[in-house]
Image (cartoon, helix red, strand yellow):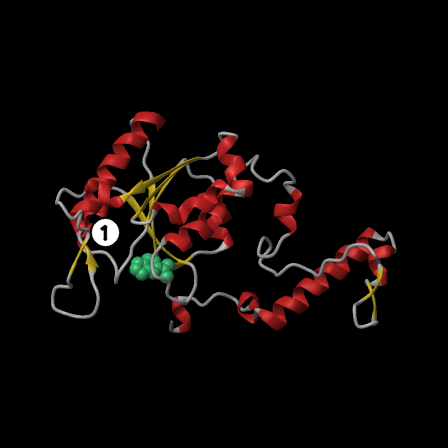
Amino acid sequence: MRIDVLTLFPEYLAPLELSLIGKARRDGLVDLRVHQLRDWTHDRHRTVDDTPLGGGAGMVMKPEPWAEAFAAVRAAGRAELGEDAEPLIVFPNPAGTPFRQATAQEWSGREWIVFACGRYEGIDERVYEHLADEGFEVALASLGDYVLNGGEVAVLAITEAVVRLVPGVVGNAESLVEESHSAGLLEYPLYTRPAAWTDPSGTLREAPAILLSGDHARIAAWRREQSEARTAARRPDLLAPPATPADGA
Ligand code: JDN
């Protein structure tokens, strides 16, 4: 999988050199390139923003550097992946579609993703129109209902969620099946040795006896109940059927 990131703060992406994702890159499973958006400016001050037309607070990202950057990154990617290759362009954006585990699953099968990190109040709307007209597939992805200062932290999260699902990146493929959200439920509680633990206040805390029973069918049933109870308590929204337009949404 190839990933390009366009950002004003390339150093923000440094954690992608670490741990599992860093190993995946060194193993050649992921080709990740980080680009400085200012490299596609032409004025002395390398300007990427200007005041909002119509007035308002803050600054808006100018369209020209973005259009040049996408054209350059598309050409460079195609030179390596093949001239028919087309990226999915992802803009992290709090007004986007919620990014979920199912999104990560889907994107982990992509050949090429280009992440575009906005800053300031956002990006001139004509950039999205231009990309659609050029035939790019564009997604706006929200990490959650809160506002960051820019897309970089969202790209860290999305990249980690996606790349760990690329075959060969996580050693034990079973751990991907068992974890929270993979079956639409939260994960069951986990325990390890010692089975009987006395905590620092002197309280004896024993792991559930069923986990020591050796009865794998009953253990699986118990874990399923725990997952369902947890999901009902913490995330009832995950158990409710998704709203449809017929519901009046
Ligand atoms: O995902 B975010 O909360 C996010 C915030 C901003 C952005 C892009 C993404 N550009 C400016 C703020």
Please state if 168 lies on the left or on the right of 153 as rendered.
right
116 is higher (above) or lower (below) than 1: below
Query: In the image shown, does 240 or 212 lie closer to the viewer?
Result: 212
Pointer 1: residues within 10 angstroms few (<14), some, or many (20+)?
some
The residue lying at 48 percent from left, 49 percent from top is 104
Q: Specify the quadrant that holds the C terminus.
A: bottom left
Q: Is mark 1 within 8 Å of ligand 1?
A: no
Give the x, y percent position of residue 217: 80, 53
Q: Quadrant of residue 3?
A: top left
Looking at the image, residue 180 sits to the left or right of residue 215; the answer is: left
* Residue at x 49%, y 47% (from the top left corner): 160
What amino acid does circle 1 point to?
Tyr
Nearest the viewer among 159 and 219 is 159
Location of mark 1 (residue): 128
| Quadrant holding the N terminus | top left
Residue 127 in view, yes or no: yes
Percent x, y of residue 59: 20, 62
Most extreme residue toward the front, as rendered?
Answer: 44
Quadrant for ligand 1 reads bottom left
Measured along the vertical axis of the image, is residue 242 above or below residue 13? below
Query: Toward the viewer: 45 or 18?
Result: 45
Find numbered disc 1 in the image and state the secondary structure of the residue it sits on: helix
